[in-house]
Image (spheres, rainbow, N blue to C red):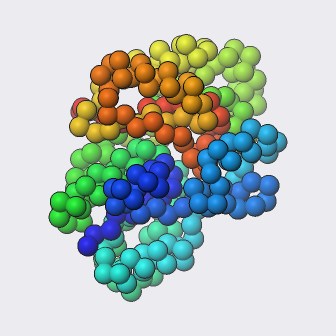
Protein backbone atom coordinates (compact mmCIF):
# COMPACT_ATOMS: atom_id res chain seq x y z
CA UNK A 1 0.00 0.00 0.00
CA UNK A 2 1.08 3.58 -0.68
CA UNK A 3 0.49 6.01 2.17
CA UNK A 4 -0.12 9.71 1.36
CA UNK A 5 0.96 12.01 4.18
CA UNK A 6 0.78 15.78 4.61
CA UNK A 7 0.85 18.19 7.54
CA UNK A 8 -1.75 20.23 9.36
CA UNK A 9 -1.01 23.43 7.43
CA UNK A 10 -2.89 21.77 4.55
CA UNK A 11 -6.10 22.75 6.40
CA UNK A 12 -7.68 19.40 5.58
CA UNK A 13 -10.13 18.48 8.30
CA UNK A 14 -9.53 15.22 10.11
CA UNK A 15 -12.76 13.86 8.60
CA UNK A 16 -11.86 14.80 5.01
CA UNK A 17 -8.33 13.45 5.41
CA UNK A 18 -9.57 10.14 6.81
CA UNK A 19 -12.23 9.84 4.12
CA UNK A 20 -9.62 10.47 1.41
CA UNK A 21 -6.92 8.27 2.90
CA UNK A 22 -4.54 11.11 3.80
CA UNK A 23 -2.49 11.09 7.01
CA UNK A 24 -1.90 14.38 8.87
CA UNK A 25 1.19 15.35 10.87
CA UNK A 26 0.51 18.31 13.18
CA UNK A 27 2.57 21.46 13.42
CA UNK A 28 2.50 23.39 16.68
CA UNK A 29 1.37 26.79 17.88
CA UNK A 30 2.70 28.38 21.07
CA UNK A 31 0.39 30.67 23.06
CA UNK A 32 1.32 32.12 26.41
CA UNK A 33 4.30 29.81 26.68
CA UNK A 34 2.22 26.65 26.15
CA UNK A 35 2.62 24.48 23.05
CA UNK A 36 -0.38 22.96 21.28
CA UNK A 37 -0.49 20.48 18.40
CA UNK A 38 -2.55 22.11 15.65
CA UNK A 39 -5.93 20.46 15.33
CA UNK A 40 -5.20 18.02 18.17
CA UNK A 41 -4.78 19.91 21.46
CA UNK A 42 -6.48 23.13 20.42
CA UNK A 43 -9.57 23.61 18.26
CA UNK A 44 -9.75 26.40 15.71
CA UNK A 45 -12.50 28.07 17.73
CA UNK A 46 -10.35 28.01 20.87
CA UNK A 47 -7.36 29.35 18.97
CA UNK A 48 -9.19 32.34 17.48
CA UNK A 49 -10.80 33.16 20.81
CA UNK A 50 -7.32 33.41 22.32
CA UNK A 51 -5.86 35.22 19.32
CA UNK A 52 -8.51 37.93 19.58
CA UNK A 53 -7.42 38.88 23.11
CA UNK A 54 -3.71 38.09 22.90
CA UNK A 55 -1.37 41.08 23.27
CA UNK A 56 1.51 39.11 21.80
CA UNK A 57 1.47 37.22 18.52
CA UNK A 58 1.52 33.44 19.05
CA UNK A 59 4.49 31.63 17.57
CA UNK A 60 4.59 28.44 15.54
CA UNK A 61 6.97 25.50 15.33
CA UNK A 62 7.58 22.58 12.99
CA UNK A 63 8.02 18.90 13.85
CA UNK A 64 11.61 17.83 14.52
CA UNK A 65 13.43 15.38 12.22
CA UNK A 66 13.07 12.77 14.98
CA UNK A 67 9.29 13.21 14.98
CA UNK A 68 9.16 12.91 11.19
CA UNK A 69 11.33 9.79 11.37
CA UNK A 70 8.91 8.27 13.88
CA UNK A 71 5.91 8.84 11.62
CA UNK A 72 7.64 7.54 8.49
CA UNK A 73 9.06 4.48 10.25
CA UNK A 74 5.63 3.60 11.61
CA UNK A 75 4.20 3.55 8.10
CA UNK A 76 7.11 1.52 6.75
CA UNK A 77 6.76 -0.99 9.58
CA UNK A 78 3.10 -1.38 8.61
CA UNK A 79 4.27 -2.35 5.11
CA UNK A 80 3.44 0.93 3.39
CA UNK A 81 5.55 3.13 1.15
CA UNK A 82 5.14 6.87 1.77
CA UNK A 83 4.72 10.09 -0.19
CA UNK A 84 4.94 13.09 2.10
CA UNK A 85 3.55 16.33 0.61
CA UNK A 86 4.78 19.19 2.77
CA UNK A 87 4.11 22.88 3.23
CA UNK A 88 6.24 25.00 0.91
CA UNK A 89 9.92 25.02 1.81
CA UNK A 90 9.81 28.81 1.37
CA UNK A 91 7.39 29.15 4.28
CA UNK A 92 8.64 26.59 6.78
CA UNK A 93 11.51 24.29 7.64
CA UNK A 94 9.08 21.37 7.92
CA UNK A 95 10.10 19.94 4.56
CA UNK A 96 13.77 19.95 5.52
CA UNK A 97 12.90 18.21 8.79
CA UNK A 98 11.02 15.62 6.73
CA UNK A 99 14.04 15.07 4.47
CA UNK A 100 16.32 14.53 7.46
CA UNK A 101 13.74 12.26 9.10
CA UNK A 102 13.45 10.26 5.88
CA UNK A 103 17.20 9.69 5.83
CA UNK A 104 17.02 8.21 9.34
CA UNK A 105 14.46 5.48 8.63
CA UNK A 106 15.36 1.87 7.87
CA UNK A 107 14.50 2.08 4.14
CA UNK A 108 14.65 5.73 3.06
CA UNK A 109 14.19 4.80 -0.61
CA UNK A 110 10.57 3.92 0.22
CA UNK A 111 9.79 7.49 1.38
CA UNK A 112 9.24 10.25 -1.21
CA UNK A 113 9.38 13.89 -0.05
CA UNK A 114 7.44 16.33 -2.23
CA UNK A 115 7.48 20.14 -1.90
CA UNK A 116 3.96 21.43 -2.48
CA UNK A 117 5.31 24.97 -3.05
CA UNK A 118 1.99 25.90 -1.47
CA UNK A 119 0.15 26.07 1.82
CA UNK A 120 -3.32 25.58 3.28
CA UNK A 121 -5.82 24.02 0.87
CA UNK A 122 -3.41 24.57 -2.03
CA UNK A 123 -1.19 22.00 -0.35
CA UNK A 124 -4.27 19.97 0.58
CA UNK A 125 -5.40 19.81 -3.05
CA UNK A 126 -2.14 18.12 -3.99
CA UNK A 127 -2.48 15.62 -1.16
CA UNK A 128 -6.07 14.79 -2.11
CA UNK A 129 -5.10 14.31 -5.76
CA UNK A 130 -2.16 12.11 -4.76
CA UNK A 131 -4.46 9.97 -2.61
CA UNK A 132 -6.87 9.57 -5.54
CA UNK A 133 -4.04 8.43 -7.80
CA UNK A 134 -2.74 6.08 -5.11
CA UNK A 135 -6.18 4.43 -4.91
CA UNK A 136 -5.99 3.96 -8.67
CA UNK A 137 -2.74 2.04 -8.23
CA UNK A 138 -0.31 4.67 -9.55
CA UNK A 139 3.35 4.42 -8.54
CA UNK A 140 5.16 7.13 -6.54
CA UNK A 141 6.97 8.24 -9.72
CA UNK A 142 3.67 8.50 -11.62
CA UNK A 143 2.06 10.43 -8.78
CA UNK A 144 4.86 12.96 -8.40
CA UNK A 145 4.86 13.50 -12.16
CA UNK A 146 1.12 14.21 -12.01
CA UNK A 147 1.65 16.60 -9.10
CA UNK A 148 4.33 18.42 -11.08
CA UNK A 149 1.72 19.03 -13.80
CA UNK A 150 -0.96 20.14 -11.33
CA UNK A 151 1.14 22.33 -9.02
CA UNK A 152 1.56 25.34 -11.42
CA UNK A 153 -2.23 25.59 -11.75
CA UNK A 154 -2.88 26.00 -8.03
CA UNK A 155 -3.86 29.54 -7.07
CA UNK A 156 -4.09 31.16 -3.66
CA UNK A 157 -5.42 34.72 -3.45
CA UNK A 158 -6.69 36.29 -0.26
CA UNK A 159 -7.79 39.48 1.43
CA UNK A 160 -6.06 40.10 4.74
CA UNK A 161 -8.50 40.94 7.54
CA UNK A 162 -6.18 43.44 9.18
CA UNK A 163 -2.58 44.60 9.16
CA UNK A 164 -1.80 44.14 12.85
CA UNK A 165 -0.67 40.52 12.68
CA UNK A 166 1.42 41.22 9.59
CA UNK A 167 3.12 44.03 11.51
CA UNK A 168 3.71 41.87 14.59
CA UNK A 169 5.20 39.07 12.49
CA UNK A 170 7.51 41.50 10.68
CA UNK A 171 5.80 41.22 7.25
CA UNK A 172 5.23 45.00 7.15
CA UNK A 173 6.84 47.86 9.06
CA UNK A 174 5.16 50.21 11.53
CA UNK A 175 4.87 53.07 9.03
CA UNK A 176 3.10 50.88 6.47
CA UNK A 177 0.84 49.64 9.24
CA UNK A 178 -0.05 53.19 10.29
CA UNK A 179 -0.90 54.44 6.79
CA UNK A 180 -2.64 51.21 5.82
CA UNK A 181 -4.84 51.37 8.92
CA UNK A 182 -5.69 55.04 8.46
CA UNK A 183 -6.69 54.48 4.84
CA UNK A 184 -8.54 51.22 5.58
CA UNK A 185 -6.28 49.38 3.14
CA UNK A 186 -6.94 45.68 2.71
CA UNK A 187 -4.06 44.20 0.71
CA UNK A 188 -5.04 41.45 -1.71
CA UNK A 189 -2.22 38.93 -1.59
CA UNK A 190 -1.39 36.04 -3.87
CA UNK A 191 1.14 33.23 -3.85
CA UNK A 192 2.92 32.98 -7.18
CA UNK A 193 4.28 29.87 -8.91
CA UNK A 194 7.64 30.28 -7.17
CA UNK A 195 5.84 30.20 -3.81
CA UNK A 196 6.48 33.89 -3.18
CA UNK A 197 3.79 36.01 -1.52
CA UNK A 198 3.01 38.99 -3.76
CA UNK A 199 0.60 41.92 -3.58
CA UNK A 200 -2.09 41.47 -6.24
CA UNK A 201 -3.93 44.71 -5.49
CA UNK A 202 -4.44 47.19 -2.66
CA UNK A 203 -8.12 47.64 -1.94
CA UNK A 204 -9.83 50.18 0.31
CA UNK A 205 -12.54 48.56 2.39
CA UNK A 206 -14.32 45.22 2.22
CA UNK A 207 -16.37 45.99 -0.91
CA UNK A 208 -13.30 46.74 -3.00
CA UNK A 209 -11.49 43.72 -1.56
CA UNK A 210 -14.45 41.61 -2.65
CA UNK A 211 -14.29 43.02 -6.19
CA UNK A 212 -10.55 42.37 -6.37
CA UNK A 213 -10.90 38.71 -5.42
CA UNK A 214 -13.64 38.08 -7.96
CA UNK A 215 -11.64 39.96 -10.59
CA UNK A 216 -8.81 37.51 -9.96
CA UNK A 217 -11.22 34.64 -10.74
CA UNK A 218 -12.03 36.23 -14.09
CA UNK A 219 -8.32 36.39 -14.86
CA UNK A 220 -7.68 32.80 -13.80
CA UNK A 221 -10.92 30.78 -14.22
CA UNK A 222 -11.30 27.73 -11.94
CA UNK A 223 -11.14 24.17 -13.26
CA UNK A 224 -14.44 22.50 -12.26
CA UNK A 225 -12.71 19.10 -12.15
CA UNK A 226 -11.29 20.06 -8.73
CA UNK A 227 -13.10 21.22 -5.60
CA UNK A 228 -12.82 24.97 -5.07
CA UNK A 229 -11.56 26.06 -1.64
CA UNK A 230 -13.00 29.06 0.20
CA UNK A 231 -10.99 29.66 3.37
CA UNK A 232 -11.52 32.17 6.16
CA UNK A 233 -10.17 33.02 9.59
CA UNK A 234 -13.03 33.11 12.07
CA UNK A 235 -15.41 35.09 9.87
CA UNK A 236 -18.27 32.71 8.97
CA UNK A 237 -20.72 35.48 8.02
CA UNK A 238 -18.42 36.97 5.39
CA UNK A 239 -17.56 33.46 4.16
CA UNK A 240 -21.26 32.59 3.78
CA UNK A 241 -21.79 35.63 1.56
CA UNK A 242 -18.82 34.71 -0.60
CA UNK A 243 -20.00 31.11 -0.89
CA UNK A 244 -23.43 32.23 -2.07
CA UNK A 245 -21.91 34.47 -4.74
CA UNK A 246 -19.46 31.81 -5.88
CA UNK A 247 -22.31 29.33 -6.25
CA UNK A 248 -24.20 31.91 -8.30
CA UNK A 249 -21.22 31.87 -10.68
CA UNK A 250 -21.64 28.11 -11.10
CA UNK A 251 -18.93 27.02 -8.65
CA UNK A 252 -20.89 24.28 -6.90
CA UNK A 253 -18.13 21.84 -5.89
CA UNK A 254 -16.99 24.13 -3.10
CA UNK A 255 -15.20 23.41 0.16
CA UNK A 256 -15.75 26.07 2.83
CA UNK A 257 -13.23 25.79 5.65
CA UNK A 258 -11.72 27.73 8.51
CA UNK A 259 -7.99 28.34 8.18
CA UNK A 260 -5.94 26.78 10.97
CA UNK A 261 -3.84 28.21 13.76
CA UNK A 262 -0.41 28.16 12.11
CA UNK A 263 -1.50 30.26 9.12
CA UNK A 264 -4.09 32.23 11.10
CA UNK A 265 -1.34 33.44 13.42
CA UNK A 266 0.24 35.41 10.57
CA UNK A 267 -2.80 36.65 8.62
CA UNK A 268 -5.12 37.43 11.53
CA UNK A 269 -8.88 37.27 12.03
CA UNK A 270 -11.11 38.33 9.11
CA UNK A 271 -8.92 37.02 6.30
CA UNK A 272 -10.73 35.34 3.41
CA UNK A 273 -9.37 33.72 0.28
CA UNK A 274 -9.78 31.51 -2.75
CA UNK A 275 -7.65 28.37 -3.09
CA UNK A 276 -8.24 26.43 -6.28
CA UNK A 277 -6.96 24.87 -9.50
CA UNK A 278 -7.22 27.00 -12.62
CA UNK A 279 -8.09 25.71 -16.08
CA UNK A 280 -4.60 26.41 -17.42
Question: Which quarter of the figure is the N terminus placed in?
Answer: bottom left
Q: Position of residue 230 (x, y in %)?
A: 45, 33
For residue 52, side relative to residue 120 (left or right): right
Q: Position of residue 70 (x, y in %)?
A: 49, 78
Q: Position of residue 112 (x, y in %)?
A: 33, 68
Q: Is residue 56 above or below residue 248?
A: below
For residue 97, side relative to residue 255 (left or right): right
What residue is drawn where x is 47% and y is 15%?
211
Q: Is residue 222 above or below residue 16?
A: above
Residue 88 visible: no
Q: Is residue 215 above or below residue 14?
A: above
Displayed quadrant of residue 36: bottom right
Residue 64 visible: yes
What residue is drawn where x is 36% and y is 23%?
247
Displayed quadrant of residue 280: top left
Displayed quadrant of residue 28: bottom right
Q: 24 and 144: which one is in front? A: 24
What residue is drawn where x is 65% and y is 34%?
269
For residue 137, side relative to residue 235 (left or right): left
What residue is drawn where x is 22% and y is 52%?
146
Q: Position of residue 225 (x, y in %)?
A: 23, 37
Q: Which residue ends up furthest to the bottom in the rendered image?
A: 106
Amino acid sequence: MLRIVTDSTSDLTAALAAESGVELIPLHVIIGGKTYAEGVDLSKEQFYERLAVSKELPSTSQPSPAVMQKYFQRYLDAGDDVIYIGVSSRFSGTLQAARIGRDLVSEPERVTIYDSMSVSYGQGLLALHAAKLAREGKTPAEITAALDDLRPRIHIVFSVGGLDNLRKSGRINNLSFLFGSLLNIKPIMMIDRDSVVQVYEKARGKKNAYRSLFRYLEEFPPDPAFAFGLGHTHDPEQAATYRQDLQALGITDLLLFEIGAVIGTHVGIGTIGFLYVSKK
